[in-house]
Image (tube, coloured by chain):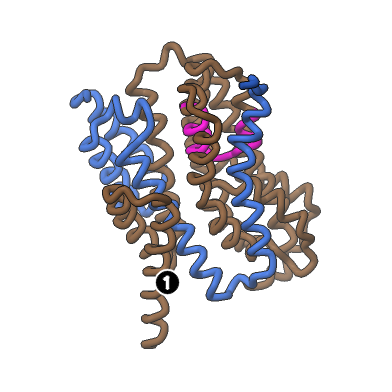
Amino acid sequence: MSPAPAESPTRPSAAAFLAGLLASFRSVFALVLIGTYVGVGALAHDFGFSLFWVMLSTVLVWAGPAQVIMISALGAGAPLFEVALAVFLSAVRFLPMVVALLPLLRGPHTRLRDLLVPAHFTAASMWVESFRLLPKLPQDERIPFCNGLAIGFMLWGHVGSVIGFYLAASLPTLLTAVLLFLTPMSFLLSTAQSSVTLVNRLALAFGLVVSPVLTYLQVGLDLMWTGLIAGSAAYAVHRLRGARR
Amino acid sequence: MIELSPYLVLLLVGFLPNEIWRVLGVWIGRELPEDSEFVVWVRAVAVAVLAAVIAKLTLVPPGALATAAPLAVRLAAIACGFMTFLIVRRSVFAGLVAGEGALLIGGLLFPA
């Protein structure tokens, strides 16, 4: 990564945190998170969870798909082990996401425990926006900026949860469907937008093809296998093209 | 069987199985330089897993999305959103509005 330009001296970390928080208000993900968590809040209300429990689950889990799985499975009375396994499998994506994000966050003096907070905040919204916004910032502003960004996103999620929880009874099914559709639609568009290199564009395209095939063939651990197969295929193309040049 | 507190349940089946991947990520990624080939590969894997999440949520979605909007409507809506994104200078917002609008109209015209 190129060093920060000399004319922009490093801000104190509180200012960088605030800048991240404000960036979350300008992001399209503010809308996506409100909408998504209106869906989560309504779902939780329907299954008899308390509003505080839902909001705590947002702070602790911070993964829309995992929360939807957890709330509907617990609410339907599934065995705890099965719920934990389903959440565990859906969260595989965080391993490569965190590994890819860390080099962008880490400077020469970064302590390991400073990385645990942004790692906890890692979710599709924050991950995509970090790759868009962090490279412009000096190295030592990136972690506080990232934390501010994620906390801002979390606040929007809470706003959505409260709305959804109290509106649950009056939400028509089609509107709930529109809210749930925000997750795949926004994941697709923001991943496409942040994928500027050939290897990432190919990984997105290959993944969209490989995943339905594996699901159709009823292969277990399909998220993990899709990642390894499609990601490695995209990487192989990238290496072959590099070798020819 | 003993009745567990809902907060203990949240920790056991929500927080722990989810968080373990993030902590593992920190442990594996703590010393990798940004330009390493390994990180390029890992990011490609992460993007492909996101693609799989997108495909699954569209093809075999949870709850109301499956009941209120049939598969053809969901596929048309996601294509409509993506095409709009490409046409309108790669704007996520424009694509999102078009995709969501298409799903709403499709759901009204073709109730499942």
Extent of the magenta region:
A56-72
Secondary structure, mark 1, is helix
Residue A76 in the image, given as x and y percentages of width and height: 46, 22
Residue occupying the point 32% across, 23% down: A174
Q: Residue furthest front?
A: B1
Q: What chain letter is assigned to the residue under label 1?
A: A
- Name the kind of residue labelled 1 in the image: Tyr
What is the letter of the blue chain? B
Residue A173 is a magenta residue: no
What is the letter of the brown chain? A
Quadrant of the frame with the C terminus of chain B: top left
Residue A65 is a magenta residue: yes
Residue occupying the point 39% across, 57% down: A226
Q: Is residue A52 visible?
A: no
Quarter of image, res B28: bottom right
Residue occupying the point 23% across, 41% down: B76
Q: Which of A105 and B41 lies nearest the eye of the viewer?
A: B41
As drawn, B101 above or below A127: above
Q: Residues within 10 Å of mark 1 (few under 14, many from 20)?
A: many
Report the residue marked by disc 1: A235
Residue occupying the point 80% across, 53% down: A12
Q: Is residue A73 left or right of residue A143?
A: left
Residue A171 in the image, given as x and y percentages of width and height: 41, 16
Secondary structure mostly seen in the magenta stretch: helix
